[in-house]
Image (cartoon, grey):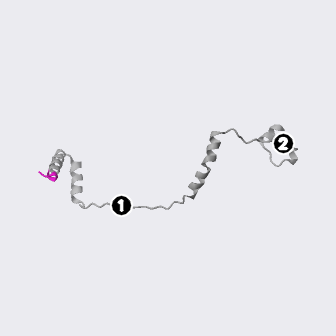
Amino acid sequence: MSEYNEQRAAFDKAVKTFDGNNSFAAARALLLSGEKTVSFNRKIIEKNIDSSWLTEIEKDLPHLDTVIRNPRNTIKEVEEIVPIAMSRKITVESIKHL
């Protein structure tokens, strides 16, 4: 027997096991009454991505690595006490000082 005939016989045997099932019979009838062609669609999408931002990040990576490995340097905040009328910015620390 050819491979097709073997597969067809196995399919027919499987179909006979569902003979009493009304849902299977309805689904099989729909499949058999439908269009019997198959088509495959293949879409190729090509995107052009600007990679200049990637080169900028790669250029700065050694500096970021240095900061992450040596976090010893911190921003120092220098406070100067001035009269409240002369101040330009009032912070929480200014209010605490008052």
- 54 or 78, which lies in front? 54
Q: Who comes first in sequence, dot 2 or dot 1?
A: 1
- Which x, y percent locates residue 63? 64, 47
Asked if 58 appears above or below 96 in the picture, the reply is: below
- The relative height of residue 30 versus residue 96 in the rendered view (above or below) is below
Relative image position of residue 33 (x, y in whole percent): 22, 59
Residue 12 is tagged as none
Which of the image's four quarters has the C terminus? top right
Compute the Cα span from label 2 to label 1. Answer: 69 Å
Q: Which mark is residue 80?
A: 2
Residue type, numbered disc 1: Arg
**Of residues 90 and 2, the one drawn nearer to the viewer in this rendering:** 2
Membership of 29 in magenta stretch = no
- Side of 27 relative to 75 (left or right): left
Q: Quadrant of residue 66?
A: top right
What range of the chain is rendered magenta?
Answer: 1-5
Cβ atoms under marks 2 and 1 closer than 8 Å:
no
Q: Main secondary structure of the magenta part?
A: helix
Q: Would residue 2 appear left or right of 35 to someone viewing this image?
A: left
